[in-house]
Image (cartoon, grey):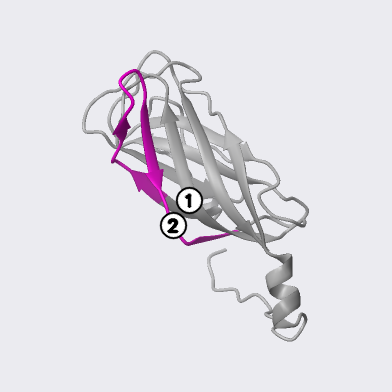
Amino acid sequence: KIGAYMAETMIRKYSTEERLGRMELDVITVTPTCDASGTDDNDVLFDFVEIPYAASIDGGACLLHSIQLLDGDDVGAKLDLVFATANTALGTIDAAVSITDANAQEILGYVQLEDYFDGINWKMSTKSSVGLALKCAEGTRSLYVAGVNRNGASITQTASGIQLKLGLLKD
C-alpha cells in the first residue's frame, strides 16, 4: 500500500543536552560479495548486504554522514549504493535492477560514487556530509546496502574486492 505516513515526533522527550548526549557516531565496515565474472552497465553489482547495528535501538534511525569505498581491484567504477530497511532482492547479480514496486517502498535512498583517489594498486572513493536519513524496520537495528554499476561499461571485481565504511550518526 502506497501512502504517506508520519512518525510521531516527541520534541520534549529529552532536553537539548540529553539529546546531544545520546547521539553516537559509528563507522561500520561492510564487505559485499560481488560477481567475479563481470557486471554489465546498469546491472546489480552486489545485492543487499546487512549493515549491522546501524541504529542504537530496534526500529531506530541514523543519519548517513559519510561513505568510504575501498576498491582493492583498482577498478574505480561509478556506482550507485542503494540503502533499504529490508533484505529484499534489488535484482539478480549481473542483471538489471528488478525489485518489485512493493519492495521498492523499503528503499530509503541512494548515493552515487564516481570520484576516486588512485592508490596505484587500489582506488578509494569518499563521500562526506551525505545527510541521508535512514530508519530501521521495527524489531531490528540493521539496514541494508546494494550496489549498481553505473560506469557506462562492464566491470570486473573479485568477490570481495569492495569494502565499504559507513559513517553513521545514530539516534
Q: Relative to residue 158, is residue 98 depicted above or below?
A: below
Q: Residue at x 51, y 48 (%)?
A: 83
Question: Can see residue 10?
Answer: no
Q: Which residue is identified by label 1?
A: 66
Residue 129 locus on image (x, y percent): 43, 58
Name the residue nearer the viewer: 102 or 82. 82
The extreme bottom residue here reads: 12
Q: Is residue 122 magenta?
A: yes
Mark 1: amino acid? Ser
Indicate the quadrant containing the N terminus: top left, top right, bottom left or bottom right. bottom right
Q: Residue 168: where, in percent of width, then height?
A: 58, 53
Q: Secondary structure at mark 1?
A: strand
Badge 1 crowding class, 10 Å Cα cut-off, few under 14, some 14 to 19, many 20 or more, is some
- The quarter of the picture where the C terminus appears is bottom right
- Residue 13 seen from this side: yes
Q: Residue at x 45, y 21 (%)?
A: 161
The residue that mark 2 highlights is 130
Q: Is residue 1 magenta?
A: no
